[in-house]
Amino acid sequence: MKTMTAGWGSGLLGVVIFSGSLPATRVAVAGFSPLFLTSARAVIAALLGLVLLWTLRQKRPSGGDLGSLAVVALGVVVGFPLLTALALQHITAAHSIIFVGLLPLCTAIFGVLRAGERPKPAFWLFSAAGSLLVAGFALAESGPGSLTGDLLMIAAILLCGLGYAEGARLSRRLGGWQVISWALVLSLPIMAVMALATLPTDWSGVETPAWVALAYVSVFSMLVGFVFWYRGLALGGIAGVGQLQLLQPFFGLALAGLLLGEPVAWTMIAVTGLIVLCVAGAKRFA
């Protein structure tokens, strides 16, 4: 029971950290190209991860783990950041929440396929209901979409769900922060070459908000958040803890209200309450 509680607490902290990722990416692509943003954030996080691995003298993963680490890198180091950065050139951050609402369901499906989890039938009802609530709320609140942006977001969600499930499965043996650190290190050579090839030609046009956003997605979205997230998935279960992602859009909107003074509508509070019930139901039957 203590392990399960620790898993859900760790997962919740990871979700809170991730809640600023898409808004920060939206700010960052105003100053950097999607390719440079994706590669730069990965390089910065990889160097930090390398320092952690070296300082704490972590044993290298076995050859059999390299395939799984490559899947994690493809999903959460390269795929999701790059595809969302490209998508956010065509759609708003609010519109992207429609697709983020599908991520918990996608993660649960890959948890079944890759980690052998078997949630009860009622779990899928709560998970689907929560996904529909988030997607419906975002659709009502967001502006018009774009076919290109929507397709990019769908691809991003599929790769991210796979990366989450694969990383959580591996975390049960290697540890959460070790998995994301090794995945980052594995992708470092390619990401470093990409970063050098896509360096901005004019740095004077990059304003302070873009630099701050780059720092956030590099340190928190790409590394620190995954330390808590993978630990939560490994301890509490991929399908169950993954449902906490349903709360991510509303944490983001709440942060916008607290830090930026943006209005918080009563509908957001009402939908958040329903989402909490869906997450509780999913936890009960996961």
Image: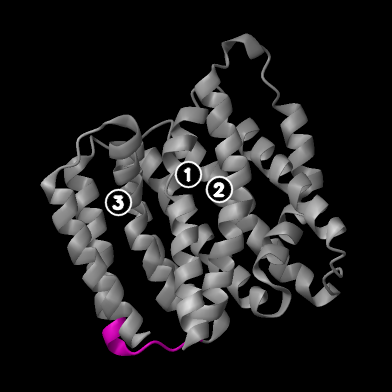
Q: Secondary structure at mark 2?
A: helix
Label 1 and label 2: CA atoms lie apart by: 6 Å
Label 3 and label 2: CA atoms lie apart by: 17 Å
Residue 32 location (% of width, % of height): 58, 25
For label 2, the residue is 221
Question: Is residue 120 one of those drawn in magenta?
Answer: yes
Which comes sooner in the sequence, label 3 or label 2?
Answer: 2
**Residue at figure coordinates x 12%, y 47% from the top left:** 266
**Residue at figure coordinates x 72%, y 33% from the top left:** 195
Q: Amino acid at mark 3?
A: Phe
Figure quadrant of the C terminus: bottom left
Disc 1 and disc 2 in contact, CB within 8 angstroms: yes
Is 264 placed left or right of 188 in the picture?
A: left
Any part of residue 212 in sight: yes
**Is the residue 74 above or below the residue 211 in the image?**
below
Residue 264 location (% of width, % of height): 19, 41
Magenta stretch, residue numbers: 117-123
